[in-house]
């Protein structure tokens, strides 16, 4: 039986939560209680942002919307949502980074951005 998209997304979110928890495991327990909620939101947003990016890459940034006898071109709803969410994601990431002690080294790039850029390049050509 094929997994539902909900379960697939849930697994991706849990994987991201675990990745972030490893980074923040050594912070003060009082700060971790704050970080935990931000980690969950960050994981959801990062997973959703990737889905939105894939949608834009597949369907484009412009959407045609029927208006009776004619249609208009508009910004894709996925682009609109992505643009709003990336701002929130950046804010959450900054808050999380501020909870890290100054001497903790942040995990190196996991390849997420490179993957998205390469996938985008492949779809352009």
Image (cartoon, rainbow, N blue to C red):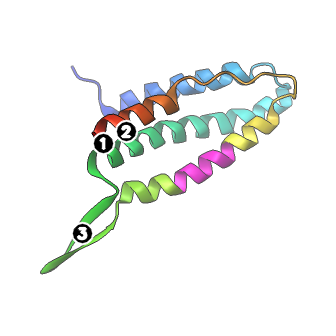
Pointer 1 local density, CA inside 10 Å: few below 14, some 14–19, many at least 20? few
Mark 1 — residue? 124
Q: Is residue 37 left or right of residue 73?
A: right
As drawn, the label of residue 65 is 3
Q: Is residue 115 left or right of residue 123?
A: right
Q: Helix, strand, or loop for circle 1?
A: helix
Pointer 3 local density, CA inside 10 Å: few below 14, some 14–19, many at least 20? few
Mark 2 — residue? 120
Residue positioned 72% across, 43% down in the render: 94
Q: Helix, strand, or loop for circle 3?
A: strand
Query: Range of the magenta residues?
Result: 84-92
- Above or below residue 113? Residue 65 is below
Give the number of the mark in front: 1 or 3: 1
Q: Is residue 81 left or right of residue 95?
A: left
Specify the quadrant of the image occupied by residue 98: top right
Residue positioned 46% across, 41% down in the render: 48
Q: Is residue 124 left or right of residue 67?
A: right
Pointer 2 local density, CA inside 10 Å: few below 14, some 14–19, many at least 20? some
Give the number of the mark in front: 2 or 3: 2
Q: Position of residue 118 (x, y in %)?
A: 40, 32
Q: Please count the marks in the image.
A: 3
Residue positioned 48% across, 36% down in the render: 47
- State the quadrant of the C terminus: top left
Q: Position of residue 38 (x, y in %)?
A: 67, 39
Per the model, the C-alpha gap separating discs 2 and 3 is 24 Å
Chief secondary structure of the magenta span?
Answer: helix
Per the model, the C-alpha gap separating discs 1 and 3 is 23 Å
Q: Position of residue 68 (x, y in %)?
A: 15, 80
């Amino acid at each position: 039986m094929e997994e539902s998209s909900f379960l697939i997304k849930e697994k991706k979110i849990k994987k991201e939560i675990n990745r972030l928890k490893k980074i923040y495991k050594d912070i003060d327990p009082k700060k971790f209680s704050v970080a935990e909620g931000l980690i969950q939101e960050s994981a959801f947003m990062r997973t959703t942002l990737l889905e939105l990016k894939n949608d834009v890459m597949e369907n484009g940034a412009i959407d045609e919307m029927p208006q009776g006898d004619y249609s208009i071109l508009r910004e894709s709803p996925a682009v609109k949502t992505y643009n709003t969410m990336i701002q929130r994601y950046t804010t959450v990431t900054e808050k999380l980074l501020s909870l890290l002690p100054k001497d903790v080294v942040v995990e190196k790039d996991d390849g997420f951005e490179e993957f998205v850029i390469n996938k985008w390049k492949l779809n352009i050509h």
